[in-house]
Image (cartoon, coloured by chain):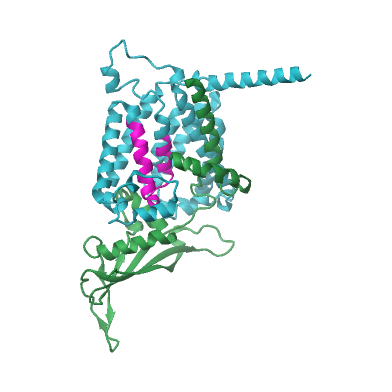
Chain colours: A green, B cyan
Amino acid sequence: MKKNAIRILALLFCLGVAIDAIPESYAWASKWKAWVHPGLRILGLSQGDWPLFAPNPVLNNGVLIGEVTDQSGNPGTWTSIDWQTASVWTKFHRFRHMNYLQRLPYNHLAANDFADYLLASIPEREPAVGSVAWGPENQMLDPKPLVPPMRDIKLYHYRNTMAIEEGQGLPALDQTQWSTQIRFIVRREANP
Amino acid sequence: MIGSLLGSMIGLARDSLRRWDHFLFESCDPLLAPVLRIGFALLIVIQTLCVWPDAAYWYSDSGVLKSQTAEQILGPQAWSLLHCSDSEPWIAQLGLLCLMIHSGLMLLGCYSRFQVAAIFVWLVSFQNRNPLITDGEDTVFRILAFLLIWLPLDAKWSVTSLWDSKKTHRTPSAKDAWALRLIQIQMTVIYASTALCKIEGETWQNGSAVGYVSRMTDNFGRWISPEWFDWPWITLLATWGTLAIEAFLPFGLWIPKIRWLAIGLAALMHLGIEASMNLFLFQWVMLLGLGSFAGRSKA
């Protein structure tokens, strides 16, 4: 009885993981995958395919920027970790932050929650700096310290992409041209 | 005619079953289980310690992702103990504390099969509570936890084996180690899947993929400088070398004569990635899974 149960469990496991891990690009397997994956997810055994920088590595260099307005109307800026300058130790113990910030710009639901979190956390838990403002006669005003709670926030993704001419291979590091694309993610206002 | 056909089919089925039984119950080294137990528990302890300061940030409603949003993102099949309760910071901390205690007891070899079953439940719960911070490494941890439940983890170097009197302590045999085969299959599936995914990519075909990876300012940059990849031959070697090894492993790991070569190449690849990239514990959990091939398994 026990041996039979193991035989069947092992066979089902092998079939399940083999089907679940077929690459998404194999259209013929999509029906099988759609059938197997939800079942495995209930069991806590789902995995999907394993791209690991495939089919092509995606350069996701950049930072998230939050433009906030405090209760007095003063503007401020919150910036996510700049991984380019972070130490190896920071990249190790804050690895989850790296995953999170890479995915956040592409997940609207999560971005809403994150913007709400920043509204409630700036400046105590999430440091932000006051930004330069402009006066009624267009004169530059010095930044003022932010006073909580924040009134609203606009979240942007500043993404650095490599400028490569068509037909050109990967340029040397010191000759690489980077261009920054700014993408608006979400705007949130504080709940009254 | 029909009788002989039926007879040969029954014979084939019996033969297949006999081979399947040999594969599962007669050919694995059960002493690998305690080694996997110690390695796995250590990695879970490290992982939990790193996430501990951010427990409320990642896993409570006062953090960055509300419980309801996580449920919306993953759908109804993704269960979590953390969805069942108020999403307060102390609940997340309590869950991590439980995870830490279970992994500590597993490390000591104290009823490790129970401990790893609990670890599996907590891993699923935390991963489903915040899917935005997880990656392939967490999937490997989760599936290994499930498979370790079925192994004689306390056979050696454990508190349980010290407690047990000689009469009750039974030395595990190959038939107790069938789940090692499932770990081996899981590892094979990972290498096969990633090789199939990569082989379709233009940059993997033309040998430039690792060059692009080296320009990732977040993940890349440890002891191997991205400037090394200014030399095209290094980029070519790293790209095609990775692809060749990953395509070779699903076969090489199963051929006894070249198994150690396959394990060596895989270890070299993982250590090379570890030296160049910041991928937390991914390479270490893969090396641990690879260890399931290292015993005195029969063909």
Report the front residue among B89 and B153. B89
Q: Is residue B51 magenta?
A: no
Residue B277 coordinates in the image, percent (x, y) = 40, 47
Q: Nearer the viewer, residue B275 or B247?
A: B247
Q: Position of residue B132 (x, y in %)?
A: 39, 52
* Picture quadrant where residue B31 is located: top left
Specify the quadrant that holds the N terminus of chain B.
top right
> What's the residue at 53%, 34% (across, down)?
B249
The residue that appears at 33% across and 14% down in the rendered structure is B169
Q: Residue at x 58, y 51 (%)?
A: B206
The magenta span reads B115-144
Residue found at the far bottom of this picture? A137
Residue reaching furthest right?
B1
Task: Please indicate whether residue B165 sits to the left or right of residue B177 in the image.
Answer: left
Question: Camera-side residue: B276 or A79?
Answer: A79
The answer to whether residue B280 of the structure is visible from this angle is no
